[in-house]
Image: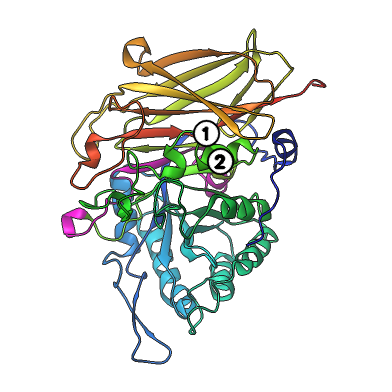
Amino acid sequence: MRILPLLPLAVLLAISPAIAIGSDEGRTWLAGDHHVHSQWSVDWDESTTPPTPIPGGDSPYTRTRNAQQAVKYGLRWMVHTDHGGPGHSRVTLEHAWPALEQARGDVPALIQFNGMEFDVPGGEHASLIVPPGADERDRLVAIERDYSRREPLERGTREDGRVMLEALAHMRALTPQPLVFINHPSRSATGVGEWGDVTPDELRQWHDAAPEVLVGMEGAPGHQAAPKHRGLYRNAGAPTFGGFDQMTARVGGAWDAILASGRRFWITATSDSHENLRDGGRDFDPGQYSKTYVWARPEADDILDGMRAGHMFAVTGDLVDAMQFTVHATGNAQRRATMGDTLVVRPGTSLRVEVKLRQPGMPNANGDTPMLDHVDLIVGTVAIDGTPQMQVKRLDAKAFTREGPWLSMRWELPPMRNGGFVRLRGSNTADAMPAADIDGESAWKDLWFYSNPVFVRVDSTD
């Protein structure tokens, strides 16, 4: 694929789409999951032409059952994302859509989005989320029919990455625009930094093609209950780290390089639920282990706006359930920014980072009440050549200040000459950095949260 040149941080931050989301009145942290399978992730009887779909092939659960489990485990929103396949757009039209309508009626407490696990031409998989509306069914069917890699009856005819760029151009022209998150980006990697079906350069190019559509990736993939190959990352040299994809977990790695380029590119955590561990599968139910929290009103459009703007964090095992994360100019608390936003400061301005985290007041789905061992402030400053210069500033639990249900902490940072970003992660383990996951470990003993970044731009004219 043709790779676009990297642009300077200041240029990219200046041209990044500004998501106007208005007042915070009525907004709170809403937990959700954008990667959930049902019985309409079908198997195929290939003895017929065209192949005949076999319901329940990749998941035994109805969409109503998934929605009920999501509510049980505290989710407020969820995206139904069944696999495609040869001619699957008809399954979407004739079966998956009526099942979504039924689930919405059966479980009205949950905001449920129409979507699919899109088979990326020239790539692997992505969560495609269609905004609700009168034509949401037909929009999804058209995207799947015209662009999904596995839709054609003749295999291998949509492997050209240019088809993905055409798909993104189509989605960019829609009003309102869909959302796309790349799923399990390093699952096919062969080593640390040795990429497979998804490369950092492809992520950059896809994002540049539609920066308000393709806005991020799974930081923590699903299949976390798998007793072998956590996340189903089967290559021993390229595992998950603390349950998170190496692109996210490795400081100074692929995600940090994308952020240093100024791209507004976010991470999430999902279940990728197919079949639960209790039923013989390798997965947790939606919300049982992984959650993506979005700062939004309990309205579908506002949730999508919050996701598009990066106002969200990813967590496993209910380690935290709310976050206040701001960066402001030292001595000027009114000039501040939070996750997904950009703080503009004059040259030579030092910074203060203020964080408050809330841990749930009740046990998680495993019956545990995990405690934060430490929180890392990850600081990326941008070198002249555009590469990130990374620092990790660790704060142990003994340094936290408790304010009611909140844990409070702060850091002072020197001026960023060329701008940069800051982000957070924390764990219930004492590990200085997430350890490579091994077979047989308990996911419940290895919990992490990751914030999305706050950008800092230095501007002498401001």
Residue situated furthest top in the rendering: 331
For the residue pair 360 and 244, the one nearer the viewer reads as 244
Dot 1, how many residues are within 10 Å of its Cα: few (below 14), some (14-19), or many (20+)?
some
Residue under label 1, please give it.
Answer: 27
In the figure, residue 241 lies in which quadrant? top left
Secondary structure at badge 2 equals helix
Horizontal relation, residue 328 to residue 118: left or right: right
Please determine whether, in this image, residue 318 is positioned above or below residue 68.
Answer: above
Tag 1 and tag 2, C-beta contact below 8 Å: yes
Residue type highlighted by circle 2:
Gly
Specify the segment rendered in magenta.
277-304
In the figure, residue 147 lies in which quadrant? bottom right
User: What residue appears at the point 34 percent right and 49 percent down from the top-left corner?
Assistant: 237
Residue type highlighted by circle 1:
Arg
User: What residue appears at the point 52 percent right and 49 percent down from the top-left corner?
Assistant: 300
User: What residue appears at the point 42 percent right and 23 percent down from the top-left corner?
Assistant: 376
Q: Residue 439 in the image: x percent, y percent?
A: 21, 48
Q: Quadrant of the N terminus?
A: bottom right
Residue under label 2, please give it.
Answer: 306
Q: Quadrant of the C terminus?
A: top right
For the residue pair 116 and 221, the one nearer the viewer reads as 221
Can residue 310 be seen here? The reply is no
Q: Is 82 contained in the magenta span?
A: no
Q: Residue 367 in the image: x percent, y percent?
A: 18, 35
Can residue 341 be seen here? The reply is yes
Q: Residue 163 in the image: x percent, y percent?
A: 62, 69
Q: Is 295 contained in the magenta span?
A: yes
Please determine whether, in this image, residue 246 is positioned above or below residue 408.
Answer: below
**Labels 1 and 2: the sequence-earlier one:** 1
